Image (cartoon, rainbow, N blue to C red):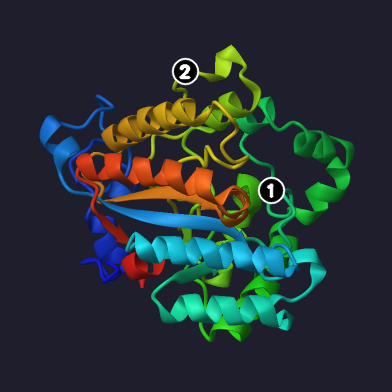
Amino acid sequence: TMQHKPKLTTRRRFLKSASSAAAGAVLGIGLTQSPSGFASERTRKRTRTFIFTCDDVGLGRHRESVERFEAVVRWLERKQIPGTFFWVPKAGNRRAEEDKLWRDAIDQARRTGHDFQLHGLTHHCLEFGVPQKSIRRHAPKMFEQYEREREKWEKEHTVRALRAKFDEAVAIYEQAFGERPLVFRAPCFGICPNAYRAMFECGIRYSSSRSVNPAATGYVLTRKPKLKPWQPDYPGRPFEEPPGVLEIPTLEDLTIRGVPPGDRELILRLFKRDITHYLDALGDWPYGVLTTHYHSIGRQFDEVTSLYDELLDWLAAQGITQWTTFKGALS
């Protein structure tokens, strides 16, 4: 059966699972990286639970989009991995519960143990803030749009405006799922300090809206030599954003454009390198987060799932054999 009942079941216990020894730790309980930046050999080899996340569910209003999602769900079930799918409540300015094709597919996935959390409102990359600056090196257009329309976006990024977006998104989520979301992920990792404040006011205490090492995706997409080295924006351990949201960074999706001919081994090498650094930075934190996109897997299903099959086998060899969902870890 799929593993989706982890030991930690409350925010307090989730936080306390991190080491309390590191000096200057966020919240005083060791959420920051250790002074050396590296875990011990014993820590690196201990079994760790990962959360498999998959973004953009609800985007795409055609049967083909839903079929790609369903194919990803079936693949995860064959791997006995419960997925956390980040769901867009108002894609194309249409409330998601109005789309019966998606609703039926999502309901079926929930019945088999998969989790759905909140992914923006309409999935505009700037709706909750500007993405991490490092992403500009391989995806400049959204930054250029922000600069052209700065006055508009500054108005949209006030706490009041962002709170209205959160309230609408949460209301649609509650209508669809009968409960409130636990975790928010901003589209394109576009988030700002006021978004954390608005999120907190709305009652959401967890975010996974920061990418550990966007440079890896940048290198896969552009082959710019300066993007090839490991150069993380965040070490990987969760940290608090004021006034009290726990930000849980995630690994990059290196298959966001699929697996181009000849790129399989490069992508696998980068995944393994980044995960190795990520595990070192996590130290004794028990959860890692892997991000994918349902449409990227579904569009090139055989090639992408074959790559992930090999990566998952490698992860198992590193001691990562347990998989859970965000809901399982936090609720």
Instruction: Please name the residue shown 47% across and 25% down the image.
Output: 266
Residue 255, compared with residue 222, is above or below; it is: below
Instruction: Rate crowding at label 2 as few (under 14), some (14 to 19) or many (20 or more) other CA atoms within 10 Å.
Output: some
User: Where does the image place residue 114, in percent across and percent down from the top left?
Assistant: 43, 71
- Is residue 170 placed above or below 159 in the rendered structure? below
Q: Nearer the viewer, residue 200 or 291?
A: 291
Q: Amino acid at mark 1?
A: Gly
Neighbour tally class for label 1: few under 14, some 14-19, many 20 plus, Cα within 10 Å:
many
The residue labelled by disc 1 is 129
- Residue 90's image quarter? bottom right
**Residue at the (72%, 79%) spot, across then down:** 99
**Where's residue 111, x and y in %?**
43, 82
Give the side of residue 257 with respect to residue 111, left or right.
right
* Callouts 2 and 1 close, C-beta under 8 Å: no
Q: Quadrant of residue 83?
A: bottom left
Secondary structure of the residue carrying tag 2 is loop
Rendered position, 83 above or below 216: below
Q: Is residue 261 visible?
A: yes
Quarter of the image for the N terminus: give it: bottom left
| Residue sitting at the far left | 42
For the residue pair 137 and 264, the one nearer the viewer reads as 264
Decide if residue 58 is in sight here: no
Residue 322 at x, y percent in the picture = 25, 57
Q: What's under tag 2, amino acid-wise? A: Pro
**Marks 2 and 1, Cα distance to the nearest angstrom?**
27 Å
> Could you tell me which secondary element the residue under label 1 belongs to?
loop
Q: Which residue is mark 2?
A: 229
* Camera-side mark, 2 or 1: 2
Of 118 and 62, nearer the camera is 62
> At 62% across and 16% down in the image, what residue appears?
224
